[in-house]
Image (cartoon, rainbow, N blue to C red):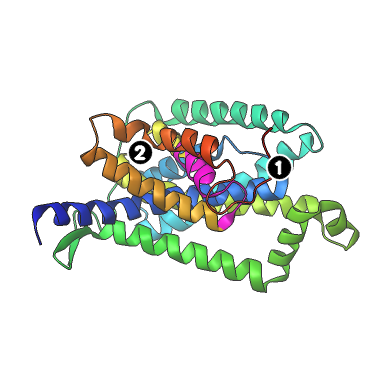
Amino acid sequence: MNDFWITFAQLTVNGIAVGAIYALVALGLVLIYKATEVLNFAHGDLLVVSAFAAWGMITVWTFPFWLALLVAVGGVALFAYALDAFIIRRIAGQPQFAGVMLTIALAFMIRGAVSMLFGPESRNYATPWSNQSTQIAGLSVANLQLVILGTAMLVTVVLFLFFRYTLLGVAMQAASQNQLAAYLNGVRVKRVNSLVWALGGVTAAFAGVLLAPITMVDISLWFVTLKALSALVLGGFGSIPGAIVGGLLIGLIEQYAGVYMPDGTKDIVAYLVLIGVLIVRPHGLLGEAHGRRV
């Protein structure tokens, strides 16, 4: 195997690992959007909260990594539930623009609160897989990347089974498709919507705790939301499979652009894809077309 193919294969592995994070974040965004029709611009700040919480538990309170992960996931899920129950729910029935502005305001408030509590400095924490790698078919794959990929696959499968085979999952699907009909059939729509926000918080927390050791624990983690939005547009806005496919594709495109395209392209390629898809195929790869341009 020559150097080109070795490099290409290594970039592919890295891209899939990064794309799995984008897919997790995009999955949370699309779950919340389908249930409540709110595009949560504060979703990335849930990653920030989970990363800083994990840092505090691991480095200050010396929690084992797995315990810190579970506590962070549970805490962020409760926080997301409370955001919907006490704040987002109050704008039900208002134009979508109200939801956008409210979540943007929440994002700045959460970011500011974290900055006041922890300071602006970047930091890091160790995981059981830090500085470890595995040789697979001649490629060196960081163990943390394997954990990220495995976690993303596990979360996706668990969510699929949850929505397919549990009464609560079916109720969530019913509420997302027709809230009035679901309410008339006995579904407590408001509570179900808050639980969907909690599920979105779970995906964000997993992404934040696993991504932070790679990119550093920093306020800038919220930028992942913008990459996840690009993934949603590419895969098809409102499509759960599209969120996963779009996340993986954006991760791969970024890695390839960082090596095979001019310097700086990697930082903007996700947004170039977003613009291109909106122009050429607005409903994305797996989304449904709604209407025609005239």
Residue for point 13% across, 65% down: 138
Residue 94 belongs to magenta span: no
- Residue picked out by circle 1: 291
> Which residue: 79% across, 38% down?
92
Q: Which residues are magenta?
A: 225-240
Q: In the image, what residue occupies the spot 48% across and 40% down?
A: 230
Q: In this image, 45 relative to 62: left or right?
A: right
Nearer to me, 207 or 14: 14
Q: Amino acid at mark 2?
A: Val
Q: Image check: 201 left or right of 260? A: right
Question: What quarter of the picture does the C terminus occupy?
Answer: top right
Q: Residues within 10 Å of mark 1 (few under 14, many from 20)?
A: few
Residue annotated with mark 2: 217
Residue occupying the far front of the picture: 294
- Crowding around mark 2 (Cα neighbors within 10 Å: few <14, some 14 to 19, many 20+) is many
Where disc 2 sits, the SS reads loop
Residue 75 at least partly seen: no
Q: Can the viewer see residue 229 in this picture?
A: yes
Give x and y (percent) for residue 37. 70, 42
The quadrant the N terminus occupies is bottom left
Between the residue at mark 2 and the residue at mark 1, the CA separation in whole angstroms equals 43 Å
Q: Residue 112, percent across and down?
A: 50, 25
